[in-house]
Image (spheres, grey):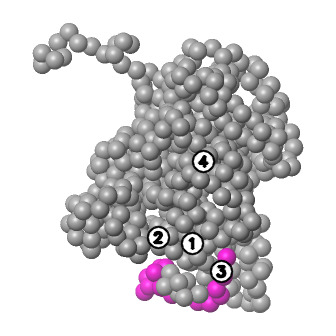
Amino acid sequence: MSIFETGLSKNRANYAALTPSDFLERAGATFPQKTAIIHGALRRSYGDFLNRSRRLADALRKRGIGQGDAVSVLAPNTPAMLESHYGIPMAGAVLNAINTRLDAMTISFILVHAEAKLVLVDKEFAPVMEEALAQIENPPPVIWIDDPLAEGGKPLGEKEYEELLAEGEPAPDWPRPTDEWQSMSLNYTSGTTGNPKGVVYHHRGAYLNAVGNAIAFGLTSSCSYLWTLPMFHCNGWTYTWGVTAVGGTHVCLRKVDPALIFEQIAEHGVSHMCAAPIVLTMLIHAPAEQKKAFSQRVNIATGGAAPPSAVISSMETMGFSVTHLYGLTETYGPSTICAWPPEWDALDLDTKAQRMARQGVWYPTLEDMRVSDPDTGEAVPADGETIGELCLRGNTVMKGYLKNPKATAEALTDGWFRSGDLAVLHPDGYAEVKDRSKDIIISGGENISSLEVEEVLYKHPKIMEAAVVAKPDEKWGETPCAFVTLAPGAGEVGVEEVTEWCREHMAPFKAPRTIVFGDLPKTSTGKIQKFVLRDKAKDL
């Protein structure tokens, strides 16, 4: 045994399991009077934020909810959603933040699959939650959130959120995890299958990715972060914890509206925000009367498709600095960043845009990144030309998919997480994705499974075959494009009929925006040639 191990042991004085809930403990002690949350006319200090989160944790524990129990939350970017990101893990339970754009059937699947012990729902989304619960034989109890800025909706469940908090005490002794590997968050992604897959996060990964965000994006205690990115999306890319880690201010925003965004930036001195590329386009093309002037420089991070040079130029002109990030739900959100070396400042705009298109280098809190040959697993040469699969590994990679060992084993293999994205590695070590997983359509920052859309199309009584691919779209990045072959004797079927069918049987944002009727190209074995359809979709 090494002399450095003899007589030295891990104990409470020199070791504590990492958990992002501790960020709020520190912020509450360090900045008790500082404004932590802004939401309309509401101002909530870090002291209040901490006490309310502790109350939520205690109330859950008194209901018998603890380690291994999922608590589902269907809410937009509100104070209650933020408190859920702390109070639920503080109870030892697992936070399941649900996409507010999902349909009732998908929400029902998630609640059953996660075995949710309690549901918190913003009153605006109570109708869809009510429909989802009606599909469950033994639905979990429900608490409704009465947010003053909600548009419509209704009470649902046994009591209101504030009444739930009143059941708890702000006791400081919440059960911290003894093992950093303990599950703390469950996020569902459509992946490459119709049914969503449950991605499980642990305390260590959430803590480290939040720290990585603070480092990579330059967060400080003076920052003001505007919530344009949904908190349900990879837990807000873990900025729900990252902003609190530095004691910054969370500026909540229920919905993405250019007029509101400019208003919040100007009024609250917003310094940082994250958004899908479509939000950048919305800001650029907002009416002149909505574009309020602001004096500060606003740092905006975007993921998905790289913004074109025209978008970068327009954003810079309006006072924004754009940062390109890359990640997946399986990697807690951002895992690589197009870090900007000083020597790139002198480049012309088009060249800058080309460099910014790269997914870049791995986060300071990720262990490693490489581009590998999909067949051999060996790293491809850094020549900027050889295509391989972008692979990641480290503490900020998911534990795996809930109740899906086969998909977990396929994703986490040979010591790497296989992203499914095809990329090249440039001589300077920067990765650049050249093609996405073939079955996934990323529209407005949301993943849409082509298989899920196809399944709905196949259920139409007049459709014999269907194939869905991504069609490039200037506004949304990509939109679903459906190629369908009608059943013999189907008669006339119009685009509107198929579109309406899809909207009735899935979340409306997943419905195809383009529908083409005709025979589908196939291989000699009868497999539909989607690469041919992708080329056709580009020209539509």
Residue type marked 2:
Lys
As helix, strand or loop, the secondary structure at mark 3 comes to strand
Identify the image quadrant of the N terminus. Answer: top left
Mark 1 against mark 3, which lies toward the viewer?
Answer: 1
Please tell me whether residue 520 belongs to the stretch shown in magenta.
yes
Residue at x-position 77% and y-position 73%: 500
Please determine whether, in this image, residue 50 is positioned above or below residue 117: above
- Whichever of callouts 1 and 3 sits on the residue coming sooner in the sequence is 1
Q: Is residue 46 visible?
A: yes
Which mark identifies residue 478?
A: 1
Foreground tag (4 vs 3)? 4
Using the image, tell me which numbered label, if any, was put on residue 438. Answer: 2
Q: Which residues are magenta?
A: 513-533
Q: Is residue 321 above or below residue 135?
A: below
The answer to the question of whether label 4 and label 1 lie on touching residues, with beta carbons closer than 8 A, is no
Q: Position of residue 472 (x, y in %)?
A: 55, 77
Sequence-first disc among 4 and 3: 4
Residue on which the image places disc 3: 514
> Image point 34% across, 70% down: which residue?
347
Q: Look at the magenta stretch and give its main secondary structure.
A: loop
Q: CA distance from mark 4 to mark 2?
A: 37 Å
Residue 438 sits inside the magenta stretch: no
Q: Which mark is residue 270?
A: 4
Extreme-top residue of the structure: 7
The residues bearing labels 1 and 2 have C-alpha atoms spaced at a distance of 13 Å
Q: CA distance from mark 4 to mark 3?
A: 38 Å
